[in-house]
Image: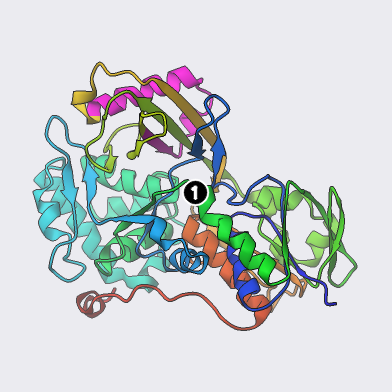
Amino acid sequence: MIAPVVVVGGGLAGISAAVRLSSAGRRVVVIESRGKLGGRATSFVDPRDGTTLDNCQHVLMGCCTNLLDLYERLGVLDAIRWHPTIHWANPPHEPDAMVPGWCPAPAHFMGSFLRMRFLSRKSKRAVARAMWQMIRLGRDGRGRWSGRPFVEFLAASAQTPEATEKFWDPIVTSACNLPCASVDASSAMLVFQQGFLQDSWSPVMGLPSVPLISLYDPAVKIIETAGGSVRLGESALALSYDGSRIAAVVTDEGSIECSVAICALPPDRLLKICSETLRRADSRLARLDEFTFSPILGVHLFFDQKVMRTPHLVLPGRRTHWLFDKGIDSWGRHHVHAVISAADAWMDLDEGDIVARVMTDLVWAIPQASGIEPLAYRTVKERRATIACTPGIDAIRPGAARDGIRGGIDNLFLAGDWCASGWPATMEGAVRSGSMAASAVLGSGGLVGDVPASWLARMLGL
C-alpha cells in the first residue's frame, strides 16, 4: 500500500488540505497536538461552568470564496448567518448603519455612508478620496505599495486624524490584526479593494451560529471515508529527512511513513521540527525565525438581561474594537463577545482589569447598559494569533510547493495563514494555503475564483 499523505496540523489550513485530498481519493493522516480540530479558530469548554466558548469571534465575508467552498464541502453552510449591515456605534445616537444599496459597486455604500453621523463631512470626503485612489490603483497599483506601511498611503491621500482613528483603523486592525501605522499597505488595500469596493456581496458579513468546533466535525468523516485518519492529541516531533525527501513524520507516539508531508503548522512550531540539514535543503524553511506575531484578545461577558440590540457593533476610536451578540445561552444569560485585535497592550493585564476596560467601552457604545454588571466573564488571550503582516512580509512568506528556481524538497508542502496565499493572515488565507498545497500534491485543481467585480468596478479599473 502506498504510504499516506501526512498533514501536520489540524487548523483551517490542514483541514482544507486534508478535505481536498480525501475528496480526490488520497489517503490522509492528520496529526494534531490538541484534542480537537480548528487550531486558533476553534472552541473550548470553560471549566468554570461547562459552557462551550469560541477562542475568539471569527468573521467571514462574501469575498472569502475558498473558506465558503470549504464550508460547502463540509456541509455546514447553513450554520452561517449573513449580515449585510455593518453597525457602527455613535452614542448617544442610535448606531450608524453601513449597508449596500441599489447602486452598482463601488458606489453601493455611497448612500448609507453619507448618512453616517460618526464622521464629519471633511472626514467623509477624505475617505471617499482614498477609496477612489484605491479603485484607480487596481491590483497592480496595490502591489507597488508593498513594503510600505498603510499609513503612508493614508497620508498621501490627505486623510484626517478623525478618519484614520474612527474609520480606517477599526477596519484594518480587525482584518489584518495590525493598525494602519504598522500593517503592510498592500495587505490593507486588498481588504478594501476585494472586501468593500469590487461588488456588493463581498462585504456581507457571515457569523457562525454554532460553536466553531462543530463546523469541523464532518471533516473527520470525509477523511476516514477515504481510508485516512485523524490523530488528535499527537504531537509531531520531527520531519525525517533522508537527504532527498521526507520519509516519515516522527511523533510522540512513533513514526508515520509518508508519501507526502504537508506541514500546516505556524512558522515557530514548524521551526522546532526541522533540522538544520532540512532547512539548508529547502529555501522555504530558511527564514522561519524571522516571523513576528500579533495577539488577539476575546472577552466573553454574560448578563442577566439583554444588553445589545444589534447583532454586532463596531466601536470607532475605542480600545475595544467589536461587540458581538451571541444570544441567550443555556443558562438564560445574554452572551456578549468583545474582541480586541492587535492587543499587545492588553496581554499583561489580569482578567479583572481587562473586563473593567471592556465594560467602559461597552457602556460608551451602549449607554442603556450603564449600571449593568456581568454575571460572569471569561477572557481568552491568543498571544500568537496571527503573523504580523508588517511591511516587507511578502518577501519571507513561502509558497506551498518548492521553489522551481532555488529547488527544495519535492514531497514537502507548506500551508498556513502565514504562507503566501495572496491574502493577509486570515481564515481565508489559511484555507487558500491548504487548497494550494493540496492542488500542488494532486497536480490539478486550484483556488476558487474571486467574486466577480461589478461592471462599473471593472470599467473604473478595479
- Note whether 84 is above or below 21 in the view shown: above
Q: What segment is highlighted magenta in the picture?
A: 336-364
* Left or right, residue 153 beside residue 344: left
- Determine the secondary structure under disc 1: helix
| Foreground of the two, 434 or 295 | 434
Q: Can residue 417 be spotted in the picture?
A: no
Q: Quadrant of residue 263?
A: bottom right
- Residue 351: x and y in percent read 49, 21
User: Which residue is at a point 46% across and 75% down the rendered structure image?
Assistant: 448
Residue count near mark 1 (Cα–Cα under 10 Å), binned few <14, some 14–19, many ≥20: many
Q: Is residue 432 magenta?
A: no
User: Which residue is at a point 25% across and 16% down the rendered structure image?
Assistant: 371
- Note whether 369 is above or below 298 in the view shown: above
- Residue 227: x and y in percent read 73, 70
Residue at the bottom extreme, as displayed = 444
| Foreground of the two, 86 or 23 | 23
| Foreground of the two, 382 or 252 | 252
| Foreground of the two, 385 or 165 | 385
User: Which residue is at a point 17% across and 36% down the rendered structure image?
Assistant: 90
Give the residue at mark 1.
212
